[in-house]
Image: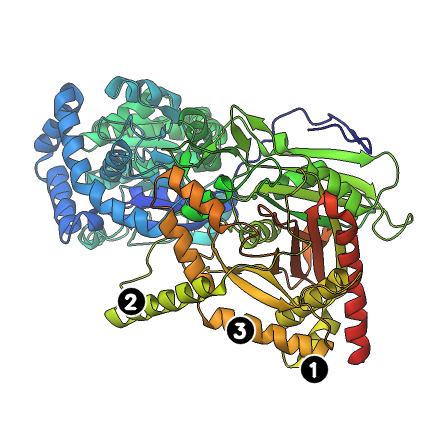
């Protein structure tokens, strides 16, 4: 930045800012194949809500997406293989591991099957991140990534302790396994795949707890050796044999069995009674965390969710007669990691239980190992690792600008840089301290497009926004202290007169400055201000202010995605749209040229001057009711009256002045989007001598005619149509339509915050919107409703600084006269 004689900058913040954009939407891809995959999904859902405040999650069942009847069929095949033909299941699993070509072909087949169907879910929900817990779902996501249809971070959590070739993919950002010993196995199956270690993905209800308290809660014997048998929601495998062996091992052993949805299993276990109170067989229960904590040992056979939940609670795990394929692989890998003991038959299970009964130190060692594993990481660490990996490894995003955004690149030059901004006055905190640089960085992290560059393109390649992973929010937020008193306008003039940095022909998308010690209301009322400027191609005023306000409330605002139709539009609706467009085009064509005024002419340089005004909104609203108009119409009338005073100050001036007034075209589907969603109403304001009441009536009439003519939507449509042309022709026509030939000044009234906005203890307000100029247009006026104030920012070419100051004062005078007339 150009040195500022009023400011002294302190390079106290040299470390990169660790903050990162919080995903607004997360898609969880799972499947109802037992409970293991959904249990992992629930853990990720819970962690995402904590890690990414305000995130909205949506679940997709891969099997349902793959087609009607696929889920029930696959579940039947799975159960039949495990219970009746384990040799066939082992053969398939072993083939995947021994024959890479077979694994690759199988994954490709599933990817082609699931990928296009998942694409519809992705297009509808527009997630910022995708979290998969089911390998067939991951296959579909990898297919989408390979075909360029999925550009957000994608992570796959292996719900089993041991990964196999169908779990791991090169084409996603990160595969997460449950233990370091599984990393080598994943790399063996799929060389080159990105793999990291995650905490066991279990919900927070599973964690260390008091064993005796849990037993009292569940009415279990406090002094018994309690074996908790859980073999998944389907309850298959050698459950009956495990229960009989445990009960026979020692009279001190009590057994609780979670039969899940297997009613037949529960009935068979209870057929011989409860063995003098030593056996409790449960159906489906929500007490799994308490049952796990209450146990001395957890007995299972697959190494999936049950084992991970036991480890999270710090309980010893015995793997009895592991089921075929993945069950056996899980058991062997858990034993290799020192986190489970494998019991192949009744004799080994009996021996293990008796040893743990007689050697409490051995049981304590197993529990300590489980706890150490669980305490290594949190589930949220895996979410952070996914985003870090995606940021580090993916090529910088390049997004071609929409025609509405590209227009501002085409019309810019050194004298009229297309920069919009906002100035936020910040109050001190409750303890009297000013807002900090860290507060400013936190807020600015929500500014749309801030972490990138605007590429102007060429004659044949349109402008684009290019992400730059090396730019952190900390890099673009400067903190400064005034060395001597200055008012806010002086601070604004310096900041907005300094152009955005340019590197290799590309323009940085934005930057901000936190300034301490300016004097808005006298030397005894020093305040801080946060000044933000963004290239106009990144967003319009509503997007910028909305993003910042929602950041203070930990809510997402900006969702970068193209327009998505809400639903099919019928013939009558399309015909009405066409008629509206035609009426608007006629209105635009018939408006003709604007009459030149002293506000028009060559813009002398990129230097800017500003005047700011605060008006009490309550009084303005009361006056608007008296004039039978809206607050926006009355604010526009005050601007017209002020323009009259300035333009007629030294003699006769124009009777009318054409003001280009951007109007939002945002709909329900585009409200939370970045970019520019505006049309333009060119309103001929009455600026000749007339009473205020007459001026208000004329303003209402002129504005209403433009809105009724559909001119804003037509202007928006014209800009979009121009974007279909080659870039060189689009640039020529953009400069032809956006210049002083067609309007004299720019003015916009923006709705903003209605209630108090607090940034980490600092009240924000007032806030002033800063608009850009246009070629040959030397003045712009931004008006905003903010809390109890109507704020006005007059911006313009520094060469007409006196006119700008005069206009600010004229707005105050016009308001006083209006208030007097309606007091």
User: 443 or 253: nearer the eye?
Assistant: 443
Is there any visible trace of residue 204 in the rendered image?
A: no
Residue 248's quadrant in the figure? top left
> Crowding near pointer 3: few (<14 within 10 Å), some, many (20+)?
some
State the image coordinates of residue 581 (x, y, percent, origin top left).
37, 65
On the rendered image, what quadrant is the N terminus found in?
top right
Mark 2 → mark 1, Cα distance in angstroms: 40 Å
Q: State yes or no: discs 3 and 1 in contact (Cβ < 8 Å).
A: no
What's the mark number on residue 230?
none
Considering only order in the chain, which callout, 1 or 2, is on the residue closer to the N terminus?
Answer: 2
State the image coordinates of residue 50 (x, y, percent, origin top left).
51, 45
On the rendered image, what quadrant is the C terminus found in?
bottom right
Q: Is residue 475 left or right of residue 615?
A: left
Residue bearing mark 3: 704
State the image coordinates of residue 324 (x, y, percent, origin top left).
17, 31
Q: Secondary structure at mark 1?
A: helix
Q: Is residue 440 left or right of residue 302?
A: right
User: 537 or 326: nearer the eye?
Assistant: 537
> Crowding near pointer 2: few (<14 within 10 Å), some, many (20+)?
few
Residue bearing mark 1: 626
> Crowding near pointer 1: few (<14 within 10 Å), some, many (20+)?
few
State the residue lying farthest toward the right: 524
Residue located at (13% from left, 40% from top):
83
Considering only order in the chain, which callout, 1 or 3, is on the residue closer to the N terminus?
Answer: 1
Mark 3 → mark 1, Cα distance in angstroms: 19 Å
Mark 2 → mark 3, Cα distance in angstroms: 24 Å
State the residue lying farthest toward the front: 652
Residue bearing mark 2: 574
Q: Secondary structure at mark 2?
A: helix
Eye-nearest disc, 2 or 3: 3
């Amino acid at each position: 930045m150009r040195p500022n004689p009023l400011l002294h900058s302190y390079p106290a913040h040299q470390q990169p800012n660790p903050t990162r954009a919080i995903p607004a939407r997360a898609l969880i891809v799972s499947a109802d194949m037992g409970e293991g995959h959904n249990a992992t999904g629930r853990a990720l859902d819970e962690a995402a809500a904590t890690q990414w405040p305000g995130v909205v999650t949506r679940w997709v069942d891969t099997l349902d997406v793959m087609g009607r009847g696929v889920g029930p069929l696959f579940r039947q095949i799975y159960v039949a293989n495990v219970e009746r033909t384990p040799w066939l299941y082992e053969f398939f699993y072993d083939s995947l591991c021994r024959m890479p070509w077979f694994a690759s072909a199988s994954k490709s087949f599933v990817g082609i099957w699931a990928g296009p169907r998942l694409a519809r879910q992705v297009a509808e929900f527009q997630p910022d991140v995708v979290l998969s817990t089911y390998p067939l779902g991951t296959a579909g996501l990898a297919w989408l990534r390979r075909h360029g249809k999925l550009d957000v971070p994608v992570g796959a959590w292996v719900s089993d302790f041991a990964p196999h070739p169908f779990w791991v993919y090169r084409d996603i950002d990160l595969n997460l396994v449950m233990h370091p010993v599984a990393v080598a196995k994943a790399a063996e199956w799929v060389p080159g795949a990105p793999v990291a270690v995650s905490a066991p993905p279990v919900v927070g209800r599973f964690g260390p707890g008091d064993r005796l308290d849990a037993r009292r809660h569940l009415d279990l014997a406090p002094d018994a050796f309690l074996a908790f048998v859980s073999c998944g929601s389907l309850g298959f495998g050698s459950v009956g044999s495990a229960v009989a062996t445990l009960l026979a091992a020692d009279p001190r052993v009590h057994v609780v069995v979670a039969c899940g949805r297997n009613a037949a299993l529960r009935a068979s276990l209870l057929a011989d009674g409860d063995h003098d109170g030593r056996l409790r067989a449960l159906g489906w229960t929500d007490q799994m965390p308490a049952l796990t904590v209450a146990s001395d040992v957890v007995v299972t056979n697959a190494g999936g969710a049950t084992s991970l939940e036991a480890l999270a609670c710090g309980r010893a795990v015995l793997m009895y007669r592991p089921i075929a394929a993945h069950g056996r692989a899980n058991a062997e890998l858990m034993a290799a990691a020192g986190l489970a003991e494998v019991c192949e038959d009744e004799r080994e299970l009996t021996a293990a239980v008796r040893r743990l009964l007689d050697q409490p130190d051995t049981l304590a060692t197993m529990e300590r190992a489980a706890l150490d594993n669980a305490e290594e990481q949190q589930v949220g660490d895996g979410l952070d690792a996914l985003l870090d990996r995606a940021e580090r490894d993916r090529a910088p995003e390049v997004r071609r600008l929409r025609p509405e955004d590209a227009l501002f690149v085409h019309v810019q030059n050194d004298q009229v840089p297309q920069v919009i901004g906002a100035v936020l006055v910040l109050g001190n905190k409750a303890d009297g301290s000013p807002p900090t640089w860290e507060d400013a960085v936190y807020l600015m992290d929500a500014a749309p497009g801030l972490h990138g560059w605007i590429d102007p393109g060429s004659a044949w390649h349109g402008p684009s926004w290019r992400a730059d992973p090396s730019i952190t929010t900390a890099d673009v937020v400067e903190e400064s202290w005034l060395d001597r008193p200055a008012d806010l306008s002086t601070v604004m003039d310096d900041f907005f007169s300094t152009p955005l940095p340019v590197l290799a022909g590309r323009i940085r998308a934005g930057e901000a400055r936190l300034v301490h010690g300016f004097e808005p209301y006298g030397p005894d009322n020093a305040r801080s201000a946060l000044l933000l400027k963004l290239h106009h191609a990144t967003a319009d005023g509503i997007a910028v202010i909305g993003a910042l306000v929602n950041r203070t409330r930990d809510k997402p605002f900006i969702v970068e995605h193209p327009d998505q139709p809400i639903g099919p539009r019928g013939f009558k609706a399309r015909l009405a749209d066409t008629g509206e467009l035609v009426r608007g085009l006629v209105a635009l064509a018939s408006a003709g040229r604007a009459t030149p005024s002293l506000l028009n002419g060559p813009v002398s340089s990129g230097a800017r001057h500003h005047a700011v005004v605060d008006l009490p909104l309550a009084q303005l609203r009361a006056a608007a009711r008296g004039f039978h108009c809206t607050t926006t119409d009355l604010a526009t009338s005050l601007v017209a009256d002020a323009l009259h005073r300035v333009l007629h100050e030294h003699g006769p001036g124009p009777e009318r002045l054409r003001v280009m007034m951007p109007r939002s075209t945002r709909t329900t589907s585009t409200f939370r989007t970045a970019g520019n969603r505006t049309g333009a109403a060119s309103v001929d304001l009455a600026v000749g001598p007339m009473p205020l009441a007459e001026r208000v009536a004329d303003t209402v009439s002129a504005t209403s005619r433009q809105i009724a003519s559909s001119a804003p939507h037509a202007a928006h449509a014209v800009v979009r149509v121009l974007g279909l042309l080659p870039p060189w022709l689009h640039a020529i026509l953009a400069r032809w339509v956006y210049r002083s030939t067609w309007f004299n000044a720019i003015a916009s009234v923006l709705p903003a915050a209605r209630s108090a906005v607090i940034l980490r203890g600092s009240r924000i307000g007032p806030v002033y919107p800063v608009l850009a100029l246009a070629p040959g247009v030397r003045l712009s006026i931004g008006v905003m409703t903010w809390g109890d104030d109507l704020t006005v920012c007059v911006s313009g070419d520094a060469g007409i600084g006196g006119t700008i100051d005069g206009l600010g004062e004229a707005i105050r005078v016009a308001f006083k006269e209006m208030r007097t007339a309606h007091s």
